[in-house]
Each structure stands twice: as structure tokens, then as C-alpha cells.
Amino acid sequence: MFANSLFRSSPFEDLWRLQHELDEMLGASRAPGASGSVPRGAFPAVNVEPSADKVDVYLFAPGIEPQGLAVRIQQNLLTVSGERRAAASDGASPYRRERFKGTFQRTITLPEDVNPEASEARYRDGVLHISVQRRAAAKPRQIEVESA
């Protein structure tokens, strides 16, 4: 609005605005104020919490039926797919729809020492918790030293 007036914005503001416009155009914008958030359209949101014994993955997927979720681990790639259905409307067309609907798939790279055979998944209150154990061979082994 004041681009050609005496109230010129700083070069940094111009660069930020250009980056924001490019992100919007390319579909790579992030939620406002969410540093480190996933790109728009990435569903479900994910937290990965590794420990010495296992890797816990939390996927935040409210409104999904647990029977409609597919969880696969191949080598160290965890893939979760499913579908979120739209709520039934009584013939009315929505004025605005911000809730994601349709099929989704997220693939997460896990550490290389996970054991796909020792994993479990639970869905409760809209959160899918996947726990994958680490291989015993990858854990440090304590060796006792005997005196001679």
C-alpha cells in the first residue's frame, strides 16, 4: 500500500514477503507462528521419540477409524496410511472447509537398528502410538573385567 511512499519497508521485510509469496505459490507454506512445522497438507502430524531401547512414534490423527489405518515397517521405513472421511452433511454445501478429508500416507525414516518384528501399534483418543524396539545386537554390551 505504501510501497512508493516515504514509508518504505526494509529490505528484510521485502525478502520475507517474497519468500512467503513463493512458499504460498509452491505450496510449501507453514502454519503461522509454527517454527519447524510440517508443510501445509502434511497429515497426520508426527512426533518421534527415540530412546536407548526403542523408538516411539506418535501420529496425531483425530477422526480416523483404527480399522482404516495401515501401518508397515520395511527395513527402517515406517509408513502409515489411511483415509479420513468427511462428516455427512444433510445436502448442504459447506461455506468453508478447513478439515482435511481423503486418503493420506506418511513415511518416516527410523534409525537403522530398529527391529520391525518387535513393534506394536495402539490407537487411542485420536493418537496412534507405534513403538518399535531396537535390535539387541545394536545395544552396547557391558563386559566385566576379572582380576588376574
Image (cartoon, rainbow, N blue to C red):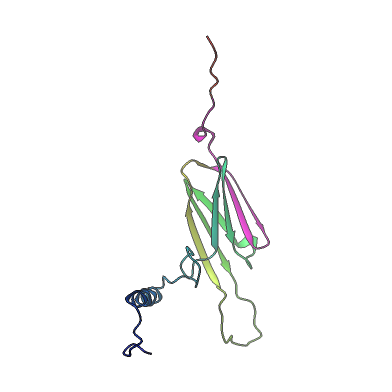
Q: Which residue is drawn at 54% across and 12% down?
A: 147
Q: In which quarter of the image is residue 8?
A: bottom left
In the drawing, does residue 109 fall left or right of residue 26? right
Q: Nearer the viewer, residue 104 or 31?
A: 31
116 shown above or below 78: above
Q: Position of residue 61 (x, y in %)?
A: 60, 64
Picture quarter with the N terminus: bottom left
- Per the rendered image, the range of residues in magenta is 116-142
Q: How many marks?
A: 0
96 shown above or below 20: below
Q: Nearer the viewer, residue 15 or 76?
A: 15
Q: Position of residue 47 (x, y in %)?
A: 55, 56
146 shown above or below 45: above
Q: Is 123 part of what is drawn in magenta? A: yes
Check the image and name the residue furthest to the top: 148
Q: Nearer the viewer, residue 30 or 111?
A: 30
Q: Where is residue 145 in the image (x, y as percent from the top left)?
A: 53, 18
Would you say the magenta stretch is mainly helix, strand or loop? strand
Q: Residue at x 36, y 89 (%)?
A: 2
Q: Where is residue 64 in the image (x, y as percent from the top left)?
A: 62, 66
Check the image and name the residue furthest to the right: 125
Q: Is 88 part of what is drawn in magenta? A: no
Q: Which residue is drawn at 55% across and 64% down?
A: 44
Q: Which of 6 and 118 is in front in this view?
A: 6
In the drawing, does residue 8 fall left or right of residue 97? left
